[in-house]
Amino acid sequence: MAAAGSGRGGGWGRSRGAVLLLFFSLSPRPPAGAAWLLGLRPEDTAPGRVSLEGGAVQAAEGSRFLLRLYFQPQPEGNGSRGPAGEQEPRLVFIEEAAPATAGGGKTARGPAERCRERSAWASDVEVVGPLRSGGAAGSALAEVRVREPRKGEAAAAAPGGRLFSLCAWDGRAWAHHGAAGGFLLRVRPASPALGAWLLPLPEAGWLRALGALLLLGLSALFSGLRLSLLSLDPLELRVLRNSGSAAEREQARRVQAVRGGGGTYLLCTLLLGQAGANAALAGWLCASLPGGGAAAAGGPRGAPWLPVLLCAAAVFLGGEVLPYSVCSRHGLAIASRTLCLTRLLMLAAFPLCYPLSRLLDWALRQELSVFSTRERLLETLRAAGPHGDLVREELAMVQGALELRTKVVEDVLTPLADCFMLRADAVLDFATVSEILRSGYTRIPVYEGDRRDNIVDLLFVKDLAFVDPDDCTPLQTVTRFYRRPLHCVFNDTRLDTLLEEFKKGKSHLAIVQRVNNEGEGDPFYEVMGIVTLEDVIEEIIKSEILDETDLYS
């Protein structure tokens, strides 16, 4: 008999891609005209499970594979009936004794006699169903199933495995086939894969489905804990603890105790758990579904993409979308109610996650969270304006206060051309005093000569309380008596800095100047205008301050 061995699997390492032929004698040769088996080869193999070695088929316990049979077609005519009146061809396996014990336990019955006895047929290796067409004349396919050993049988098996020969019924007579060593099939103990001892699969389908649901639940749990515990950074927890409702304050206090000042340790713990649950779920599904571990173990082959697609859909919907939908609405409440579980997880992952978190903190120098900057806070206020509790005026004042550091004096100054000023040689007669009172200003710059940028003094209106317009007192007499200091600032001074200067009480008006280095010659100071405390306050409240004189101007 010849057994061709060019399967599609990767178990043909020694064949180097060539077709292997297994020859063994057909003795006794059936009479002329009988259909007799010419050869066979494993058709559907799996690496490490089914192969062709040493002139025999090597199969692991628990495997399932196809054998392609090559036979001589039977001529037309009636043949004698086999067992129970069978006339269709069939295959059975009988177990052979190991070579070391063959002499002591050898039976006097011939191989053909053993093939006719049903009690000699092996139940551990059987052909499932009838033979199927092989797609060509003289060819057929047989599905062989090797049963996993029962409890206690592994120790009784031979060190090299159990040996089986083949009995073929062609509709007329039994023929026994075996290789040179007396056997055709060697069954070896299956090598346990990583998933076999890490994730032992139950036989019942509902138990496998239950295990997949439990692993998916673990993935969803870790994802939900990560979203609920890490969605709020320490700053937001502090805000809720100080300004939230009574329930929010208590929940924020409890979460802050676990969250701590840094969330890297917690993040590493939850990510490790979620990654482990997802990996276990993927391995479980691949080992349970056709096309995954079932096919690798010799089971029926299915679509190889089915476990991958199902695992991706389960993790996406059950492990990400569902936890996010729930925790985005009730994250703080869920986090506060699962703190005991979180502490246990952190304790279990301490040997691995704590050193890793310390390394990340050292490398990144800050917590892995979202920090609130001035720009983000401003944009948050603008985005939440129509939906928040702040009225428009309050929102404008908050924005103005936050934007104070981003503006400079040049943005709010009053140009010299628009300023009300007095000449230094002016006389405080009735017309001049009336003009001062109509202007409505309390502080008036005084310039000398014809250049308005040559500011030399500052007049306070309250200094005119004891001045009689009929006396026509020169303006310089009053300004030299009081000697009000001039406060000068540069055009690029920030408004918050200017506000601090005004708060010191020295003056509420400042002369704005800049360094002019244009053209040839030495740089010089150039007066651009004036700025007052009122200008700064208007920038804060985002509104104009109008008084009685402004209404008539």
Image: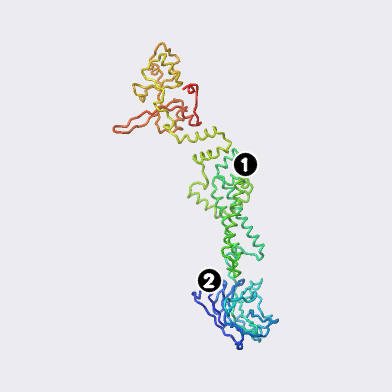
Numbered disc 1: secondary structure: helix
Check the image and tell me how it is coloured. Answer: rainbow
Question: Who is closer to the viewer here, 111 or 551?
Answer: 551
Q: Of circles 2 and 1, which is in front?
A: 2
Q: Residues within 10 Å of mark 1 (few under 14, many from 20)?
A: some
Is 57 situated above or below 327? below
Q: Quadrant of residue 416?
A: top left
Q: Residues within 10 Å of mark 2 (few under 14, many from 20)?
A: some
Q: CA distance from mark 2 to mark 1?
A: 61 Å
Question: Who is closer to the viewer here, 519 or 51?
Answer: 519
Question: Who is closer to the viewer here, 208 or 417?
Answer: 417
Counting from the top left corner in percent of width and height, residue 501 is at: 45, 29
Counting from the top left corner in percent of width and height, residue 489 is at: 40, 29
Question: Who is closer to the viewer here, 189 or 261?
Answer: 189
Nearer-N-terminus badge (2/1):
2
The residue lying furthest to the bottom in this view is 31
Residue 113, disc: none
Residue 248, disc: 1
| Amino acid type of the residue that numbered disc 2 sits on in the rendered structure | Gly
| Residue shown at 59% from the left, 38% from the top | 242
Is 370 situated above or below 165? above
The residue at which mark 2 appears reads as 10
Counting from the top left corner in percent of width and height, residue 365 is at: 48, 47
Numbered disc 2: secondary structure: loop
Is 464 situated above or below 236? above
